[in-house]
Image: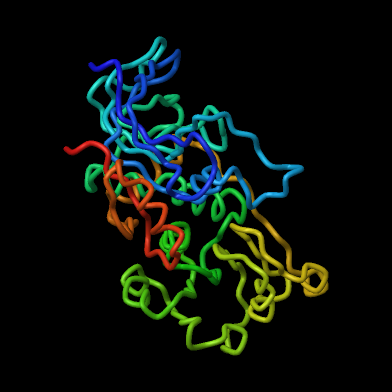
Amino acid sequence: MPETMRAVRLHAFGGPEVLVHEEVPRPEPGPGEVLIRVHAAGLNPPDWYARTGFANIPESVRPRLTLPFTPGSDISGIVAAVGPEVTELAEGDAVFGLVRFPGLDNGGKGYAEYTTSPVSHLARKPTGIDHVQAAGVPMAGLTAYQYLFDHIQLEPDKTVLVNGAAGGVGHFVTQLAKTAGAHVIAVASGRHEEFLRDLGVDRFIDYTTTAVEEVVVRDVDYLVDTVGGPHGHRFLPALKPGGTISPVFHGDYHREHAAELGITFVSGQVHSDGAQMAELARLIDAGRLRVGVDSVFPLADASKAHERAEQGHIQGKIILSVTEG
């Protein structure tokens, strides 16, 4: 096994151009960890927030990162070595997971040919999909799963409105809500309609041609808003009294008015969870959950992948292909 590897790191904060593909030492797994030969890594918003030094967060509460920094928390690959005290996995096992999140300096370091992970953050990769697709699951899939089943505690026959339904988190929320017996209304641009109807949405609204607040959508139990922003409050008329809004990103929801309507807010920070990854894998192999892939870039072109992310209007996930096979 080589003592060095290729990885993408940043030595300064800034735009996509600060991502440098270079030779670095290969890590070693510690107690309870495995070394993974990364086949694919998924991109997530925290990757580009970190790349900018969290410029989107007020300086007084801004996380501090130690440079050089390797982004990436979503990985799919093969166990290359096991550390002390590891019995659950063996060399050669195919695994995927959200690694060390929400950790920062000691995060997943997924933009690399090898990385380490606690065994508890991993699950066996679904057999029915390849590593590229598997790398698109962890953060987005766990966010959707934890929002619906840990925070909202979704019950059958409820109506879920998903804003940004074609994106990474949105397309998983849409499908997982359907597996729970919910009625799902999807909001996205028209070019995503076929994709979302294939995922089983009950109703589709093209926000580019129809103002959501002008559509007769009423008595929604839950809004999962993966977009946020200054106009989040436009969804208030769609929710029934006592309904729930779950923002994935910050938005202006006119919370005092929402409180007058009996609308509550439920959300939480996504976190690594190998057991929940195993449940997502089960749903994928059962054909009940699909992974949308927007685009795939070689590891060396991580900067181009970040440029694609900044363009927005993503359908599914952006993936870095790291190791073939």
Between residues 166 and 115, which one lies in front from this camera angle?
A: 115
Name the residue: 44% across, 80% down.
Answer: 204
Placement of the N terminus among the 4 image quadrants: top left
Residue 66, how many percent across, how many down?
57, 29
Q: Nearer the viewer, residue 7 or 206?
A: 7
**x and y, in percent, of residue 239 in the image:** 66, 75
Q: State left or right for residue 254 relative to residue 138.
A: right
Q: Is residue 293 above or below residue 7?
A: below
Q: Give the residue displayed 56% in from the left and 59% down from the top.
A: 154
Asked if 270 appears above or below 256 in the picture, the reply is above
For the point 23% across and 45% down, which residue is it? 130
Q: Quadrant of residue 270?
A: top right
**Snapshot colouring:** rainbow
Q: Quadrant of the C terminus?
A: top left
The image quadrant of residue 320 is top left
Residue lying at 73% horizontally and 75% vertically, measured from the top left: 241
Total marks in image: 0
Q: Position of residue 45 (x, y in %)?
A: 51, 51
Q: Pick whichever, 184 or 99, lies toward us.
A: 99
Horizontal and vertical percent position of residue 134: 31, 45
Residue at the outermost top position: 84
